[in-house]
Amino acid sequence: MLAHPSHLMPSGNPSIGQTGEMTTTVLVTRSVPDKVAAIGVPVFTAGAVPRAIGLSRAALIKHGFEGKPGQTLVVPSPTGPTHIAVGLGDPGRPTTAALRNAAAALVRAAGKRASLATTLADVPGVEASRAAQAVVEGALLAAYRFGGIKKEPNKTTLTELVLVVGAARANAARVGSERGQTTAAAASMARDLANTPPGYMAARHIAEKAVAVGHACGLQVEVFNRDQLAEMGCGGMLGVNAGSTEPPRMVRLTYAPRNASGHLAMVGKGVMFDSGGLSLKPSDGMITMKMDMSGAAAVLSAMSTLKALRCKTKVTGYLMCTDNMTGGGATKLGDVLTFRNGKTAEIHNTDAEGRLVLADGLSLAVEDKPDAIVDIATLTGACMVALGTKLAGVIGNNQPFIDAVRAAADTADEQVWQLPLEKAYRKLLDSNVADMRNIGGPHGGAITASLFLSEFVGDVPWAHLDIAGPMAVDADDGWLSKGATGFGTRLLIELALSFRG
Ligand code: BES
Ligand code: MN
Ligand code: ZN
């Protein structure tokens, strides 16, 4: 275990909390255990109100509960456990997204109650394993708390979740519950990595974490240091790292099942702290920049589940990890960097650094000859301006692969919206001294950033996810808990599981 910097380390508490550990026990049973503190009961906007609630439709409405998605009503009972009515909207076919949201709403309404049961996974119209997975994901992700660096670390208050389902659904629900626990634990690990303060989570630390996680999860892990990156010609990584006292790390993860049915590469931006470099960010824009490694965190976390979920596709992952600082050696405006694939870029703004580390990662990924490459990065404020904080941008060079990413996003309910890879904007990147400059004009920043990346993927089908917007939330919101969201982790898992080379 690498020591954290001693001037930052609280005495006697060197741990960074419970990274990736889920402390909630999840059970699937056929009847409600009598000791639970509360029971979540789904209620639609029309049709019969389940008897267990003990209130009529009119009485529920009088209390302001109409059964709309996200609504909850706590109905105390003088004898048994509290019942919590959970709105599911229109009767008919609920979606897995509605179940995930409802489970999250239930956990939030339950407050500090430690044990919860629910019949949400038993609603008809959604296949039992998919329903159970969604309910478990919604509940565990809503219950997530970052431990923090505190004398008394924050803790999840939910210790037990019981899914109550009919006998015919029990086996499938168990499978889905297991999957949900796996995917929620992965997304929680991504959140932990991004929430951890930058002094505790430099490139060396995430690389060490990747070694531990990779070995525990059946991945091959290779870590490359500064000298090795120099040897390999990764001038983007070196250029971004030049102003830092922390060394860079590139991590290559390999998941190689027997008789793999295809090969997918994933490249994650791992800027451990983005000060902007000499093109320094203002303070307000810098405070969230410990999370600028959220792409790398999503790749590592997603890959940690592939063996457990019996993924049939080979997956290679690249974590491009360095911070972006202003030290005396920092890359200057006008400097030219040479990337792994031999192309060069003139630096016009050191704050456009994500594309520089991705350029090396994409070049390396292409050399593995994968069937497709997905990259994930907190890349541009422009994408956040365009799509807000709920949606990630997706841009690529191959519509069928982009559609596969969109389908995975849909299943995970991590929303994406496609932007065009508009070739007419390529001239905005023209430079007199290098193959390109690293920024375009004042407009279309998410697109010009993607055009830059497209110079490094050759003709491999490629999709880029810009997660700057959904990287974090300011307050608890459904299954998103305040702070880093882990966005993209479950999307990447779905993409790998559904990938057909
Ligand atoms: N990491 C930032 C993008 C970002 C901003 C992520 C806000 C999450 C929240 C990225 O490195 C950056 O600084 N991009 C610049 C690019 C510009 C200089 C062309 C930006 O978006 O301002
Ligand atoms: Mn930046
Ligand atoms: Zn950045």
Image (cartoon, rainbow, N blue to C red):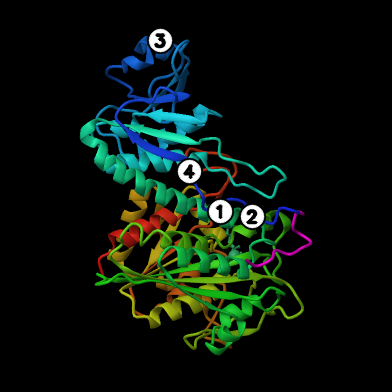
Q: Which residue is mark 4?
A: 141
- Give coordinates of residue 296: x percent, y percent: 51, 64
Q: Which residue is mark 1?
A: 19
Residue type, label 2: Ile
Q: Which residue is mark 3?
A: 59
Q: Is residue 63 visible?
A: yes
Camera-near label (4 vs 1) is 1
- Give coordinates of residue 423: x percent, y percent: 41, 73
Q: Is mark 2 within 8 Å of ligand 1?
A: no
Give the class, few, some or many, for how many residues have Cα within 10 Å of label 2's Cα (few <14, many ≥20).
many
Q: Which residue is mark 2?
A: 16
Residue type, label 1: Thr
Q: For the residues marked 3 and 1, what is the alpha-carbon distance in whole angstroms?
A: 44 Å
Q: Quadrant of ligand 1?
A: bottom right
Q: For the residues marked 1 and 2, what is the alpha-carbon distance in whole angstroms?
A: 7 Å
Which residues lie in the magenta part? 1-11
* Among the two numbered marks 4 and 1 on one chain, the one whose residue lies closer to the N terminus: 1
Residue at x 38%, y 16% (from the top left corner)? 53
Q: Are marks 1 and 2 in contact (CB under 8 Å)?
A: yes
Camera-near label (3 vs 2) is 2
Q: For the residues marked 4 and 1, what is the alpha-carbon distance in whole angstroms?
A: 14 Å
